Image (cartoon, rainbow, N blue to C red):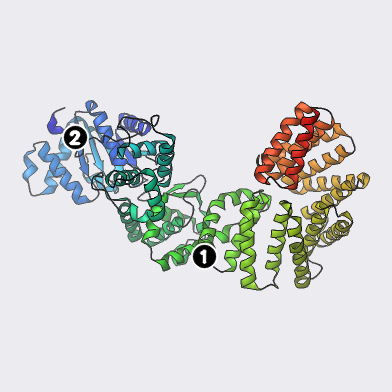
Amino acid sequence: MPEELWNIPYPRNPFFTARETVLEEMRNALLTKKLAALSGLGGIGKTQTVIEYAYRYRHEYQAILWVRAAFETELVSGFVRLAELFNLPVSQQQDESLVIAAVKQWLATHNGWLLIVDNADDIAMLREFLPGAHQGYVLLTTRAQATGIYQRIEIKKMPPEDGALLLLRRAKLIAEEAGLDGVSEEERTLAETISREMDGLPLALDQAAAFIEETPSSLAEYLQFYREEGARLLAERGELAIDHPNVAITFSLAFQKVLQRNPTAGDLIWVCAFLAPDAIPEEIFTKGAAELGENLSQLANKPLDFVKVIQEAGRFSLIYRNPTNKTLDIHRLVQEVLKAEMDEDNCRLWAQRTVCAVTQVFPNAEYANWRECDRLLPHAKVAIDWISQYQFESEKAALLLNETGYYLDERGQYSEAEPLYEKALSLRQRLLGEEHPDVASSYNNLAGLYLSQGKYSEAEPLYQTALSLRQRLLGEDHFDVATSYNNLAALYYFQGKYSEAEPLYQTALSLRKRLLGEEHPHVASSYNNLAALYESQKRYSEAEPLYQIALSLRKRLLGEEHPHIATSYNNLGALYYFQGRYSEAEPLYQTALSLRKRLLGEEHPDVTTSYNDLAGLYYSQGRYSEAQPLYEKALEIAELSLGVNHPNTITIRENLKLLRDKA
């Protein structure tokens, strides 16, 4: 290629790392469509990737041309330089429209050229500059997500290992062509950790490497500095860094453009900054709209307007939308920069709005809502961090603590649930006083958690307090009172205090039938619990019909795919097992185990129970080789989910020891 038709304004980056898939996608797109756009967040490496493409494939083009297009004036200046490059007679004309027309004519009458238009965020602006028909190729870099006639290639954040390699090469800690193989395990771990902290953003990694090289400092020092003063480091640019504004300026300018165009879109991005960065459910903005300020509140029940606001918010790739899942993503460094620029009052305001919106949409943690709870859980956890940081004292804050704790409790994540229950109780006591039904609910929930953990002496006074409060505040004929009778009975049952448990279980069953009717899941639970009590007392003939009623009710009311169905199968299997009816017990145990693994996940305490019970059946039949792996699996899960000192864990450990001694 003649040197005069090569006007790339940058040298090849010796530290360019990875991006092989993106480079191949760009090449294929240009070969097939001739028009391609490399799209992504500012600082994600679009320009550096296009530079690498130009150097790598320069032999495939007759000319490679480069213009910048962040502003129309830049684009005009770029075309004037192209006229000079082409030695066009009009290049010295004062009338720029004549110069642009001449360059368009050159592009229309020559072939094999590649025109790179860098920072082309306003793609519609290009129509006046490019010929309608030509035999060349056009490659854009853009933050726009909608690219029209240009085939969009999205460039995403780097995986941790690629980011670590870029960091190490750029910081001169390894040679330019070296891989991670020759790096110590400690250095690799630190580099990958920094890459994760930067969320795979090449610009941030380049800044980090420049700091490490120029200071000089170690990877460990930089990581410590970043964790202590990340926003300050993101605003710095090394003297030897690549020609690009720092991370803070890059994101701040993009956000200001969004805010100027559409303040509501700016508000949406602000809310995203106060949530977990990935898979932000859109219902936070729709169902929780009333909590998010005047602009966003107007979007409630206006789905088209909401989508248009998302379009504006994503104009510079500050957020991404997954239309299938109806979720939004935001880069965590965008979050950091936006929060760092806020004053304390504004930060507190948006944190509080976010807490209220998440509380509004977080559902009750019954099994039917688990998928929705799981979708919202990462954002609830972040909102709870804001509650702690700003010491928000409101009933909504207490409700979010309680509901999130209840969901974690239901999923068997007891250690995560406990501090949330404790904070909810404390907050409700301060806000509502001791004499309030919500305080009673918090006592009840915390007691239930202690019961699940085998902390019986801690659970009992809380259950008793909850029952007493509910009786006094709600009256005897109330569903919550029936729940308290049931739960206190369960505590006595697990302690072996059967004579104290029985009248409470019977009272709970009677109340529930009267208040809820026979056809209700809670009535089925009461039948199940009373049957378990009879089974423990070897009153098998009384237990069996109650178990069968509970199973039948649950199937009818809940469907076959429900954890309570698995519980009924397991309990009925246990009844047959204790009667020596092994052939009847085995398929029930197996069905319960299969259901629980599918519905609850491998690490749930109920799965532990199923493994242990099935192992016990095999042990009793002398099938030791089948029992041992089940006991071992049960012990592994129990130690993880319940802890090494939980009564169930101790029982499983003893069962396994007996089997090994026997075998």
Which amino acid type is shown beneath numbered disc 2?
Ala
Residue 464, given in percent of the width and then of the height, sits at 78, 64
Mark number displayed over residue 219: none
Residue 15, compared with residue 314, is above or below; it is: above
| Alpha carbons under labels 1 and 2: distance apart | 54 Å
The C terminus is located in which quarter? top right
Left or right side of 559 for 349: left
Q: Which residue is mark 2?
A: 108
Vertical relation: 183 (above or below) 209? above
Q: Is residue 251 visible?
A: no
**Foreground residue among 541 and 67:** 541
User: Would you say the residues marked 1 and 2 are in contact, meaning their CB atoms lie under 8 Å apart?
Assistant: no
Callout 1: SS: helix
Q: Residue at x 8, y 38 (%)?
A: 88
Identify the image quadrant of the N terminus: top left
Q: Which residue is mark 1?
A: 290
194, 126: nearer the viewer:
194
Residue 158 pos. (x, y %): 39, 39
